[in-house]
Image (cartoon, grey):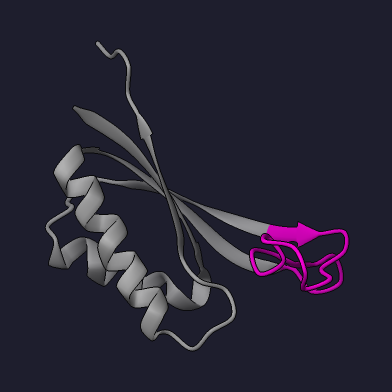
Amino acid sequence: MMKFVIIQSAEAYHHELEQIFRDIKINSYSELPVDGFMESADGNSDISNWFGSSKNPYRYFISFTFLEEDKANELLERIKRFNEEAEGISPISAFISAIEKFV
């Protein structure tokens, strides 16, 4: 079954994410640059590390791809391992969504 995978990565980790794609042979994906803003980054919410405050926006990339389920799971596992080893405050985030129908 095909999965839609969405990945959010700080610009600082963009090269590492591209390397993960190469390592597990993901040859087709799309991405968009995103400037992230947050009204109040109090450090207490789950999304406080995603985006900077309105005074200091951060550059992010949203990448997305369609993968078979096993490849999507492998991608998330590699991202999880990267986040465990990274020392930054803004981990790479990834989400898997099922594709119900396609033509």
State the image coordinates of residue 74 (x, y, percent, origin top left).
20, 56
State the image coordinates of residue 9 (x, y, percent, origin top left).
48, 64
Q: Is residue 99 left or right of residue 21?
A: right
Say above or below: 83 vs 31: below
Taking the magenta stretch, the answer to whether it contains residue 31 is no
Identify the image quadrant of the C terminus: top left
Q: Is residue 84 left or right of residue 46?
A: left
Along the line of sight, the residue nearer the viewer: 11 or 78: 78
Say above or below: 102 vs 66: above
Identify the residue at image location x=31%, y=74%.
81
Q: Is residue 3 left or right of residue 11?
A: left
Identify the image quadrant of the N terminus: top left
Identify the residue at image location x=50%, y=71%.
91
State the image coordinates of residue 7 (x, y, percent, origin top left).
43, 53
- Residue segment shown in magenta: 36-57
Which residue is most to the bottom?
87
Magenta-drawn stretch, dominant element (helix, strand or loop): loop
Taking the magenta stretch, the answer to whether it contains residue 53 is yes
State the image coordinates of residue 72 (x, y, percent, origin top left).
24, 47
Identify the residue at image location x=50%, y=58%.
61
Instruction: Give the quadrant of residue 51.
Output: bottom right
Instruction: Give the quadrant of residue 45.
Output: bottom right
User: How many numbered callouts?
Assistant: 0
